[in-house]
Amino acid sequence: MHFPSIHTTPLIALEPLFTSKKSPSLPYCVGAGCLSVRDNIRRRRQILTFLAVFAALPFALRPAAAGPITETETFAGPYHVEVKRARQITFTYTISAETPDDRVEKWVVNLPEPPATGSQKIDQVDFTVEGSAAEWAERKEESALKRPFRTVVVGKDGVAPGKITITMIYKATMSDRRLVAGKPPEAVSNLSADEVMAWTAATPTCDYLDTEVQAWIEKHGLTKATEESTLRFAWRVFQAVQKNLRYELPNGEANFFRCSRTVKTGKGDCGASNLLFCAALRNSGIPARVYCGRGVINPNPGASHSRGEFYANGVGWVPVDATAPTRDGGERFERFGNDPGLYFATSLDTDWQIELPVYGVQRLTWIHQYAVPYRLKRKPTWEGFKLRESFALNEQSVSLPSNATPFTNPSAPAQAVSPASGNASPIQGMFWLTESGKRHNSTCRFYKKSKGKPCGSHEGTPCGTCGG
């Protein structure tokens, strides 16, 4: 099946870094939604509104006792991440996807599990599919991070509606994290060797081994000195990003988010800026990563945004928003070590690898959701495709103890939550139950390699290799 080229600007230019040899190229769109001109204008206004609100946050968010961080800050002595204020939120995210006719065999929608972070504790995740029978499966993507996500399949017996509406309801507790001087109230454990390896690795998007990125790092002296503290080095990298990049909206360019493109153009959005910050830290062996998500700010929640964080031994994960300023002298240094909890992370880091029926493994730079319609009679899947999104936010304040610490210093790449409720049932076919009672998922080398039958995600005994 052929996929036509997409020339409209994507919601957040998801980049298919490669597809399998047997699969055609899927367009680089958040979810599957390439937007109309009107939608592009609306989305750009949402992004600019979110940036304006975030940039206008009062500098007083940093505790007065700590004082502002100066450009010559040495970070001498102990530091820790403290938690102030918290609120419980119910964030409702609805997508409506449609094709121009009813010639759809099925819809396959992939939803990442929202990760636990130091500012975000996931209390509950639910989803519903409006007016259609659906099946779901809990899966892990194909990259080394094995991040959890859910696949929802809409359609039965080769027939599916031309339009689907899926509502995701996230209940979470959000907190305000700040880097302050002083010893932590309790000891912070270091990351394991595997975790350090995961968050210092070069990736197709965080391509810090590229010659141009290495030249940029050398030009600005961004290699950690032997006696230099992690906090001091990260602060130097943050300043370099703020002073040498300028903000640019995603433009549909295939490699827009790659660090090699960012250093070459000197421009990038929130995602590209934070990735370059992380790249410089990873190059010196310091764990760093990014989150992709949505603003949870009334009256207009839902604007897409990315943030970063890095790990300092004895301190934990330190929040950062290295988004490039729009003008010279517009640096926002208070974003270093400060996360006011106004952003809900829907997914963790970049370079997702999701296997799709027929089309094989697709690599996505970012993901909020990824909806794919399978059309009948070999009609191009993306012809006439439309995606609409809407958001709602309810919130209330909650009290915290005086010595509160970050919700987690999440060591695992992500945390799965309980199965979703609603009118969805486990997918039969994403898992294979052998006659011996072992359950294999579709990524396992033993999947459908011996006698058995399709099964649900909780039947039988999970395979020791793939985890079932």
Image: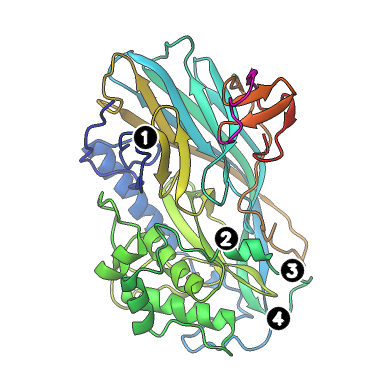
Residue at which label 2 appears: 198
Q: Earlier in the sequence, mark 2 or mark 4?
A: 4
Mark 3–mark 4 contact, CB under 8 Å? no
Q: Amino acid at mark 4?
A: Gly
For disc 4, the marked residue is 182
Q: Is residue 167 above or below residue 326?
A: above
| Other-residue count near label 3 (Cα within 10 Å), few / some / many at <14 / 14–19 / ≥20 | few
Q: Which structural element holds mark 2?
A: helix
In the image, what residue type sits under mark 2?
Answer: Ala
Determine the residue positioned at 59% across, 84% down: 229
Magenta span: 443-455
Determine the residue located farthest toward the front in the rendered image: 450
Task: Decide if residue 147 is in sight here.
Answer: yes
Q: Nearer the viewer, mark 2 or mark 3?
A: 2
Q: Is residue 361 magenta?
A: no
In the rendered structure, the answer to whether residue 457 lies left or right of residue 277 reads right
Q: CA distance from mark 3 to mark 4?
A: 17 Å
Left/right placement of residue 180 relative to residue 110 reads right
Q: Nearer the viewer, mark 1 or mark 2?
A: 2
Magenta portion: prevailing SS class: loop
Identify the mark nearer the N-term, 1 or 3. Answer: 1
Q: CA distance from mark 1 to mark 4?
A: 47 Å
Name the foreground residue: 403 vs 36: 36
Q: Is 128 in front, or is 146?
A: 146
